[in-house]
């Protein structure tokens, strides 16, 4: 292919990659607040920093090709990230992660295309850049696939849902009516983002905070009664021979951290030190068992080392399940 034909195409693709990479950076920064553990938080912060460096390299590559300076792309990247981050709050967490995965696949496919164009143009510098992008986005695709597998298996996922995502996913049914009203108001605020900029952003944050407060207050009031009611419902179901119903109630109690210490898959768990608990968790071969222990841990001692080790163990189990 003639280099003069390739160069405009390269410029177009590099600009698209820069825009998407800036969006990727902002999304990673949003995800930091959803990290379950400090280790995942550090990983996401590093991802955001790496994305910023990739965007800078793409900008320099465009400069080397004498591309006309693009002052719109950075702004578009920030706006897209803001819209994505706000709109997805009314989605279940798996839908938000699927959106992240779609973004990474687009980045990966475009990087592969740029690599082909660079090879055809005999531009070794751009080819090295494209190779680095392909490697980075392949790793992120694998990570997101693992996180989605963790979510599908019901394990201790690396990312926790925001309050609004819990509502959308059906977790906080107790506040369904006030939340629906707040979400409707929140969505109206989001719809004005492109028209009113920072003012709409502040409005969106205000509505999000309202929903968070509603959810937290209602959950605190209802938790004790909820746990007792669920325990009784499971006992009654087992007494009446409704094993399927009892199993579903037990799963709900497990995920809420409402099991008693005697019901955990690790005998004497309450008396274990953090290192002993970590070693015991690593011996568990079932995602459900790990989930039960972590949910109990988070509701009681909430030792970060134990939770982090459990999340890492579930990630390994999820990788095996997903074939990553």
Image: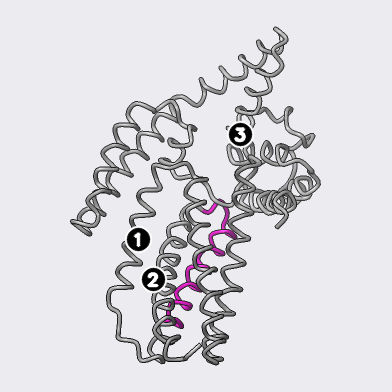
Residue hosting label 3: 255
Give how far across and how far down residue 317 sits, in percent. 73, 49
Q: Is residue 160 left or right of residue 319?
A: left
Q: Looking at the image, is mark 3 or mark 1 earlier in the sequence?
A: 1
Q: Looking at the image, is mark 2 or mark 1 earlier in the sequence?
A: 2
Separation (CA) of disc 2 from disc 3: 39 Å
Separation (CA) of disc 3 from disc 1: 34 Å
Residue sitting at 47 percent across and 90 percent down? 2
Residue sitting at 37 percent across and 40 percent down? 212
Q: Nearer the viewer, residue 245 or 95?
A: 95
Instruction: Judge the density around disc 3: few (<14), some (14-19), many (≥20) Cα neighbours within 10 Å.
Output: many
Q: Is residue 83 left or right of residue 98?
A: left
Is disc 3 placed on a helix, strand or loop? helix
Q: Nearer the viewer, residue 230 or 12?
A: 12
Residue hosting label 2: 19
As drawn, the residue found furthest toward the front would be: 1
Give how far across and how far down residue 272 sits, in percent. 75, 42
Q: Nearer the viewer, mark 2 or mark 3?
A: 2
Q: Which residues are magenta?
A: 35-58
Residue hosting label 1: 80
Residue sitting at 78 percent across and 50 percent down? 279
Is disc 2 placed on a helix, strand or loop? helix
CB-based contact (under 8 Å), mark 2 and mark 1: yes
Residue sitting at 72 percent across and 51 percent down? 313
Separation (CA) of disc 2 from disc 1: 9 Å
Does the magenta-highlighted stretch encompass residue 17?
Answer: no
Which of the image's four quarters has the C terminus? bottom right
């Amino acid at each position: 292919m003639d280099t003069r034909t390739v160069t405009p195409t390269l410029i177009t693709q590099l600009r698209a990659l820069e825009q998407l990479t800036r969006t990727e950076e902002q999304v990673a920064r949003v995800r930091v607040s959803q990290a379950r553990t400090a280790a995942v938080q550090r990983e996401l912060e590093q991802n955001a920093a790496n994305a910023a460096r990739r965007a800078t390299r793409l900008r320099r590559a465009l400069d080397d090709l004498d591309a006309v300076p693009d002052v719109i792309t950075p702004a578009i990247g920030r706006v897209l990230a803001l819209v994505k981050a706000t709109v997805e709050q009314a989605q279940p967490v798996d839908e938000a992660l699927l959106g992240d995965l779609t973004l990474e696949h687009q980045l990966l496919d475009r990087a592969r295309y740029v690599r082909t164009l660079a090879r055809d143009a005999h531009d070794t510098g751009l080819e090295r850049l494209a190779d680095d992008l392909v490697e980075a986005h392949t790793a992120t695709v694998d990570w997101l696939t693992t996180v989605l597998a963790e979510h599908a298996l019901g394990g201790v996922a690396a990312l926790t849902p925001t309050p609004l995502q819990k509502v959308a996913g059906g977790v906080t049914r107790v506040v369904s009516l006030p939340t629906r009203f707040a979400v409707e108001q929140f969505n109206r605020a989001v719809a004005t983002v492109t028209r009113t900029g920072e003012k709409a952003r502040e409005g969106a944050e205000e509505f999000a905070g309202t929903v968070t407060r509603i959810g937290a207050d209602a959950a605190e009031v209802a938790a004790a009664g909820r746990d007792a009611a669920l325990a009784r419902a499971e006992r009654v179901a087992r007494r009446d021979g409704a094993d399927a119903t009892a199993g579903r109630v037990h799963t709900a109690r497990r995920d809420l951290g409402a099991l008693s210490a005697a019901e955990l898959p690790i005998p004497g768990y309450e008396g274990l030190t953090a290192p002993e608990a970590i070693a015991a968790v690593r011996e568990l071969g079932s995602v459900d068992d790990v989930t039960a222990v972590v949910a109990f841990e988070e509701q009681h001692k909430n030792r970060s080392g134990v939770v982090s080790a459990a999340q890492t163990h579930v990630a390994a189990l999820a990788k095996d399940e997903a074939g990553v």
